[in-house]
């Protein structure tokens, strides 16, 4: 087994530092020199002197390692604690995590990961090394590995409350995935007419994705009459209801209102779902299934045109009309302008014209 691997100074928080030692695959943190017989206590000094003190302590730890010091006592304690970790740690941590009001999709993903991980561990306690191997040795696509890795890094914080130690971050790779292009529609009206003849639910979904720039599988599927104004002129979604976590109000176009009105019963509850008519919405694959069936019979759809292509086609029109990233961010419900920029790059929209580029004729000679 490898022993000494690395040692460095780490900033824990504002004015707080520690010595981070990686030894035999385990991470140790030291805030003073007690372990090596030093009287140094950087954290007890004024803030402006702590960094200098911790750097001096770093040198002391290096010297101690050079003459044979090891964190064996601390290591033994850690090994003992690891052996005492309950085999039910995963399920206990999952139960605690699910109480935090997670989204439906996130909860489903986390349950699936924990279920697969439990099978993989075969009763062994979870460690950072085993969790990393769970990802690295799998036959999943790079996209799936990236999602599992991201979820587990967050889940480790919950497991740490129950005795788990370590991190998979340095033991795994952040896999790069190819961007999935949802090809915009050239004749969106013709495609909408074809969908209307096929299914009115799918047609309204596509109208809302194109005209209101809502996301089909969550924002549209979960839409209630309470989210829509009485005159059907706008839709209001709380931050908890959309991916960007921001309150969002979008206008409803005149071309959408007649179809929306046709779905609205004379007597209704504000809690009723627009599509199911009940408080309980359709399952999360409802529109995905309808789209898959429609795709098989469509004469107009091209390769890479998906349900999200309606939202992307609408986004292109908004940007071409306004030229404003801020407005695009607002109507799309993006959490930041950076997300909007990335979105436009994904749609291959040029944001700088030739006239905006440097010109020889305008250069200044000195």
Image: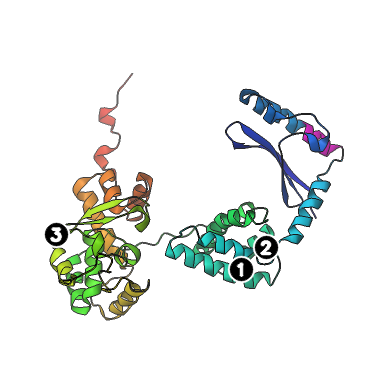
Query: What residue sits 67% from the left and 62% below the top?
Result: 126
Rendering quarter of residue 222: bottom left
- Calculate the distance from the C-alpha at mark 1 to the C-alpha at mark 2: 9 Å
The stretch of residues the image draws in magenta is 60-67
Given residues 118 and 98, the one toward you in this image is 98
Does residue 338 appear to the left or right of 35 in the view shown? left
Q: Secondary structure at mark 3?
A: loop
Q: Crowding at label 3, few (<14), some or many (≥20) Cα neighbours within 10 Å? A: few
Q: Secondary structure at mark 1?
A: helix
- Point out the frontmost of discs 3 and 2: 3
Q: Crowding at label 1, few (<14), some or many (≥20) Cα neighbours within 10 Å? A: some
- One can see residue 173 in this view: no
Q: Where is mark 3, residue-wise?
A: 231
Q: Where is mark 2, residue-wise?
A: 126
* Chain-order first, disc 3 or disc 2: 2
* Chain-order first, disc 3 or disc 1: 1
Q: Where is mark 1, residue-wise?
A: 117
């Amino acid at each position: 087994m490898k022993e000494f691997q690395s040692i460095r100074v780490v900033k824990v928080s504002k004015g707080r530092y520690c010595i981070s030692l990686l030894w035999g695959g385990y991470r140790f943190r030291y805030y003073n020199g007690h372990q090596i017989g030093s009287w140094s206590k950087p954290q007890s000094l004024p803030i402006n002197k702590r960094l200098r003190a911790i750097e001096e302590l770093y040198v002391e730890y290096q010297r101690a390692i050079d003459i044979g010091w090891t964190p064996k006592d601390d290591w033994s304690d850690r090994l003992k604690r690891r052996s005492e970790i309950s085999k039910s740690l995963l399920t206990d941590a999952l139960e605690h995590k699910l109480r935090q009001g997670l989204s439906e999709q996130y909860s489903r993903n986390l349950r699936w990961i924990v279920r697969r991980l439990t099978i993989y561990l075969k009763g062994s306690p979870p460690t950072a090394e085993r969790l990393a191997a769970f990802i690295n040795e799998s036959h999943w696509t790079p996209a799936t590995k990236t999602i599992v890795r991201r979820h587990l890094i967050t889940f480790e914080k919950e497991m740490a409350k129950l005795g788990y130690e370590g991190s998979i971050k340095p033991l795994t790779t952040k896999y790069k995935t190819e961007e999935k292009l949802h090809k915009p529609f050239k004749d969106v009206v013709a495609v909408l007419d074809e969908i209307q003849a096929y299914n009115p639910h799918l047609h309204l979904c596509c109208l809302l994705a194109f005209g209101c720039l809502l996301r089909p599988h969550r924002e549209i599927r979960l839409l209630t009459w309470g989210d829509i104004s009485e005159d059907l002129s706008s839709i209001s979604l709380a931050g908890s209801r959309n991916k960007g976590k921001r309150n969002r109000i979008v206008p409803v176009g005149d071309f959408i209102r007649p179809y929306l009105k046709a779905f609205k019963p004379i007597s209704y509850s504000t809690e009723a779902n627009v599509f199911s008519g009940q408080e309980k919405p359709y399952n999360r694959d409802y529109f995905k299934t309808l789209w898959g069936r429609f795709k098989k019979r469509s004469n107009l759809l091209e390769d890479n045109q998906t349900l999200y292509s309606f939202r992307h086609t609408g986004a292109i029109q908004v940007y071409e009309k306004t030229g404003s990233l801020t407005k695009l961010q607002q109507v799309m419900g993006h959490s930041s302008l950076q997300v909007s920029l990335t979105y436009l790059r994904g749609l291959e929209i040029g944001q700088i014209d030739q006239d905006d580029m440097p010109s020889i004729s305008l250069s200044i000679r000195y």
